[in-house]
Amino acid sequence: MDEIEKSIQNMAHNTIPVRVLELDKVQIIYLKCKNHYIFTLKQENKKLLIVAVLHERMDIINRVKNRL
């Protein structure tokens, strides 16, 4: 399993510190893993919905906004 997959599993199990970003009144949970950012939404059933996995050199904010 690669590091991105491990990070997503850790996010789902709340075993890794994450950050919260609010865009358009939506709280996005995110984490940096090496050169990538993983963006997720917490759903009502407590599962994470992966919104995007983006490289740090991309226009991250606009790409995530377009996926909301």
Image (tube, helix red, strand yellow):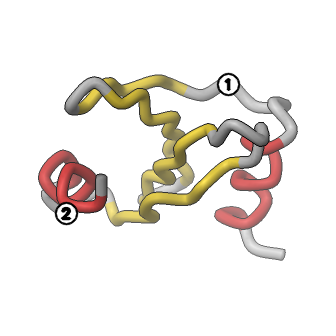
Who comes first in sequence, dot 1 or dot 2? 1
What is the residue that sits farthest to the bottom in this orientation? 1
Identify the amino acid type marked 1: Pro
- Residue 58's tag is 2
Residue at the image point whose x is 64% and y is 42% from the top: 43
Image position of 42 (left or right of 22): right
In three-dimensional space, the C-alpha distance between marks 1 and 2, rounded to whole angstroms, equals 23 Å
* Residue 34 vertical position relative to residue 30 in the rendered view, above or below: below
**Mark carried by residue 38:** none
Residue 31 lies, in percent from the top left, at: 53, 40
Q: Is residue 55 above or below residue 18?
A: below
**Residue 27, picture quadrant:** top left
Q: Residues within 10 Å of mark 2 (few under 14, many from 20)?
A: few
Q: Toward the viewer: 13 or 45?
A: 45
Which secondary structure lies at badge 2? Answer: loop
Identity, as a three-letter code, of the amino acid under mark 2: Met
Residue at 50% in and 25% down: 19
Instruction: Tally the numbered discs.
Output: 2
- Quarter residue 15 falls in: top right
| Element carrying mark 1 | loop
Q: Residue 32: x and y, percent?
A: 50, 44
State the residue at coordinates (29%, 61%).
67
User: Residue 52, located in which quarter of the rendered image?
Assistant: bottom left
Question: Eyeballing the image, is 5 above or below 64?
Answer: below
* Residue that extends furthest to the front in the rendered view of this protein: 44
- Residue 11 percent across, percent down from the top left: 73, 41
For the residues bearing labels 1 and 2, Cβ distance under 8 angstroms:
no
Q: Residue at x 56, y 51 (%)?
A: 33
Badge 1 density bin: few <14, some 14–19, many ≥20, Cα 10 Å: few
The residue tagged 1 is 17
Q: Position of residue 54 (x, y in %)?
A: 36, 64
